[in-house]
């Protein structure tokens, strides 16, 4: 049922019927819609999108369960939690490296974490706080819901999660909470088995991303221990993307930032953070895609508005460390790319630098001006 159909049916009536289904035990989730989105490494990430009805029920459950489980989550878990964000995780990892000398960093990657979480242990995590059998049964049905995948030729329905007894669908409102709950098991084991204290190895976690910051010499042991614990939890370490970085000789990337040794204007080395090369390339590719000939039919003002949304969101997140040189590079690329798009759109020759000078881009079309000084940097959270 679509939003328009719900409006015609009557929102209050629709909600009351849904409430009655839940009270009578007749509620059954409908199949998820599989959607594939591109990943930064060139692959694709599967999302399982619930219908409106199931999203409403999941959100209602999340409003109740979220605060209950929030009290159980650990302070080094930064993903999908109120008052916490990705930049806080980056700052914490940077603090371990720069202020505490934990210069060996396990840069770990898990293979398909959300799709690999085993249902049995996960539901035991939930049942520690939830005694209601009906709600537990509903959560299990969400985990095992069929998935519909459509392409140009056909529609097929699979029951992979039910058959494998694994996975919490990314794209559903309840999924981030369930993922945090299961990852908590690894963090508890790391603490209770004494690995943090014995190795002086501190985990920083955001969703399925983690780094372990260790004292020099302890990195190999931390890496081996992490592999063993993940295996015991039924998870798989992506060996191709997992590495041990030894600072300052090496840098590591975490949540879009590179952390490691950089050099100031006078050549003085320092440990700092800046947007990773991958993050910059990804933004430039999006700007490129936004200024292709396929967009010539659009008004320049609308194209610039779309580019502005990209730039604002990117600058609000990447505003830590010496970002001004990166801003300068991005600003130059956006200006030249937009000028070239404008001149080709009008059928003229040249690069567009003379026909559409920078002043025209900013004052007439309203292009977002990336900050040129630290005083102008945005301070919004990620």
Image: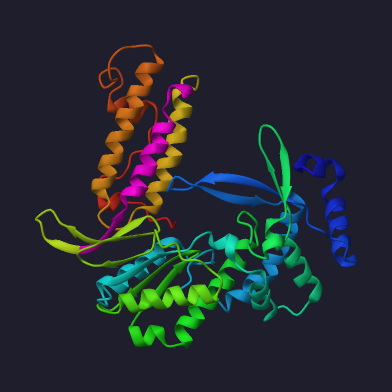
**Vertically, is 17 above or below 89?**
above
In this rendering, would 211 be left or right of 179?
left
Give the residue drawn at x 33%, y 23%.
340
In this rendering, would 22 be left or right of 144?
right
Name which quarter of the figure residue 142 lies in.
bottom right
In this rendering, would 9 be left or right of 78?
right
Give the residue drawn at x 81%, y 41%.
5
Which coloring applies here?
rainbow
Give the residue drawn at x 51%, y 81%.
188
Q: Residue 136 appears at what percent x and percent y?
A: 75, 72
User: What range is drawn magenta here?
Assistant: 271-295
Q: Residue 249 appears at what percent x and percent y?
A: 19, 64
Magenta residue check for 289: yes
Quadrant containing the C terminus in the rendered view? bottom left
Res 107 seen here: yes
Res 74 seen here: no
Name which quarter of the figure residue 37 lies in.
top right
Q: Residue 323 appears at what percent x and percent y?
A: 27, 51
Name which quarter of the figure residue 62 lies in.
bottom right
Identify which residue, 374 or 189, lies in the foreground.
189
**Vertically, is 212 above or below 307?**
below
Give the residue drawn at x 75%, y 60%.
57
Quadrant containing the N terminus in the rendered view? top right
Magenta residue check for 243: no
Identify which residue, 48 or 1, lies in the foreground.
48
Q: Residue 144 appears at what percent x and percent y?
A: 72, 61
Identify which residue, 19 or 182, lies in the foreground.
182
Identify which residue, 343 or 369, lies in the foreground.
343
Magenta-colored segment: predominant secondary structure: helix
């Amino acid at each position: 049922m679509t939003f328009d159909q719900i409006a015609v049916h009557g929102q209050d009536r629709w909600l009351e019927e849904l409430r009655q289904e839940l009270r009578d035990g007749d509620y059954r989730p409908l199949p998820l819609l599989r959607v594939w989105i591109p990943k930064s490494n060139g692959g694709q990430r599967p999302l399982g999108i619930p219908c409106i009805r199931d999203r409403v029920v999941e959100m209602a459950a999340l409003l109740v369960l979220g605060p209950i489980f929030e009290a159980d989550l650990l302070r080094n878990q930064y993903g999908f939690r109120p008052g916490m964000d990705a930049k806080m995780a980056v700052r914490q990892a940077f603090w371990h490296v720069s202020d505490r000398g934990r210069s060996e960093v396990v840069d770990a990657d898990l293979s398909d974490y959300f799709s690999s979480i085993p249902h049995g242990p996960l539901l035991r995590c939930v049942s520690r706080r939830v005694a209601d059998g009906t709600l537990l049964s509903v959560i299990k049905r969400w985990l095992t819901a069929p998935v519909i995948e459509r392409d140009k030729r056909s529609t097929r329905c699979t029951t992979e999660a039910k058959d494998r007894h694994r996975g919490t669908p990314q794209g559903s409102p309840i999924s981030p909470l369930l993922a945090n709950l299961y990852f908590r098991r690894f963090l508890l084991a790391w603490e209770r088995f004494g690995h943090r204290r014995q190795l002086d190895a501190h985990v920083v976690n955001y969703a399925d991303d983690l780094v372990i910051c260790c004292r020099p010499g302890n990195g190999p042991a931390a890496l081996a221990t992490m592999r063993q614990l993940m295996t015991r939890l039924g998870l798989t370490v992506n060996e191709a993307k997992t590495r041990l970085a030894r600072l300052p000789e090496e840098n590591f990337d975490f949540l879009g930032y590179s952390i490691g040794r950089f050099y100031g204007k006078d050549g003085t080395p320092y440990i700092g953070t800046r947007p990773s090369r991958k993050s910059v390339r990804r933004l430039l590719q999006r700007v490129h895609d936004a200024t292709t000939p396929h967009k010539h039919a659009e008004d320049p003002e609308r194209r610039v508005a779309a580019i502005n949304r990209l730039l604002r969101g990117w600058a609000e997140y990447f505003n830590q460390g010496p970002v001004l040189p990166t801003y300068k590079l991005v600003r130059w690329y956006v200006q030249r790319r937009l000028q070239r798009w404008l001149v080709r759109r009008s059928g003229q020759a040249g690069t567009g630098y003379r026909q559409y000078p920078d002043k025209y881009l900013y004052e007439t079309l309203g292009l977002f001006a990336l900050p040129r000084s630290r005083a102008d940097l945005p301070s919004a959270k990620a």
